[in-house]
Amino acid sequence: MSRHELAIEYIKSHILNAPSYHPKLPYLDEATWYKAFNWMSPEAVDRNKKFQRYGSFLIKAIATLRIGRQFCSQGEGLFERIRSIIAHNETFSALTHKLAFTSKQGADVKISDERLAAVFKVVVTEVCLQHGFENVCVWIGSLFDPLLPHARDVCRWWSGPPGTKTNLKNTNKSQKKISGHQTRAKRMLLGTRTFAGPSQLSKKTRSLPSNLPFLPGDPKIMRQVARGYGTRENPILVDCESDGEVCNSSARRRKPRSDSQTKPARNTVKDEDDSSSALGN
């Protein structure tokens, strides 16, 4: 068994056996649970695969932000190892056992761990649809945050003793790379110019259901994040190194110009109205 497999087994054991770990199951109606476990018809399989891809995108992006928030001073190697353990299908299947997903199945049928991991991703998408983007961020954070210190400890063992080539060093270069991971995750969620709209999405992402709360690059979500999510009350999308400042150039306020440098102001009334209406919706 490789070190990576041993690390995953350690996290799975903690999820299933730790007395202090009590994650909560999100509320979903019976019809939603039935759809998540229904992989019988071609239509159901096609639907769940789309939801699975969307849930995988959400989990990886939010996990990146949570890891960067807790361990922003660590090396890039440790960052990558933690994410490879937390955002892993075996970790997802262990979470489904801990959360008793099978009690919502409605039929006493044995399901493989691989299928349970897929169901977990589908449920993440359903939570986002029914309870909103902010709430799915909070729920995934409540699942991962207690696991991150244990994942860090096992990954430090994984990296080897001090003095070896695999030892991790907290250099400025590695910290910048971690900051880059966080920035890319925020760009995926907030929709900046490097990931700007449906035309730049892959075919798989464009095939997602049209009634999802948002797609990567949706300007409505970008305005919501700039106005509401990027605060101390909602730190999931806030850079830990910027003291509450959203890591998004379009969300930052420009410095006021002096009188001598003042230029005719652009018409921003429409944008503000759009932002207010987006939050109201």
Image (cartoon, grey):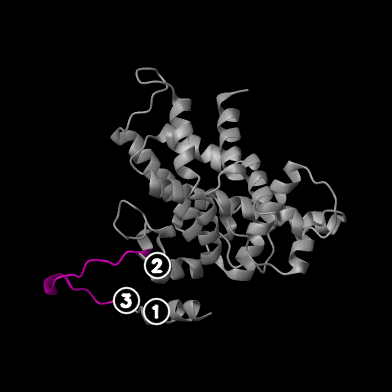
**Foreground residue among 7 and 132:** 7
Distance from disc 3 to disc 2, alpha carbons, whole Å, reads 19 Å
Q: Magenta stretch: residue 256 in it?
A: yes
Q: Residue at x 44, y 80 (%)?
A: 276
Q: Residues within 10 Å of mark 1 (few under 14, many from 20)?
A: few
Q: Residue at x 51, y 61 (%)?
A: 138
Q: Which residue is mark 3?
A: 266
Provide the major secondary structure of the magenta segment.
loop
Q: Position of residue 261 (x, y in %)?
A: 15, 70
Q: Earlier in the sequence, mark 3 or mark 2?
A: 2
Q: Residue at x 63, y 22 (%)?
A: 1
Q: Judging from the image, what secondary structure is the residue with disc 2 in?
A: helix
Which amino acid type is shown beneath numbered disc 1?
Glu
Foreground tag (3 vs 2): 2
Q: Quadrant of residue 167?
A: top left
Q: Is residue 204 visible?
A: no
Distance from disc 1 to disc 2, alpha carbons, whole Å, reads 11 Å
Q: Which residue is mark 2?
A: 226
Q: Judging from the image, what secondary structure is the residue with disc 3 in?
A: loop
Q: Quadrant of residue 193?
A: bottom left
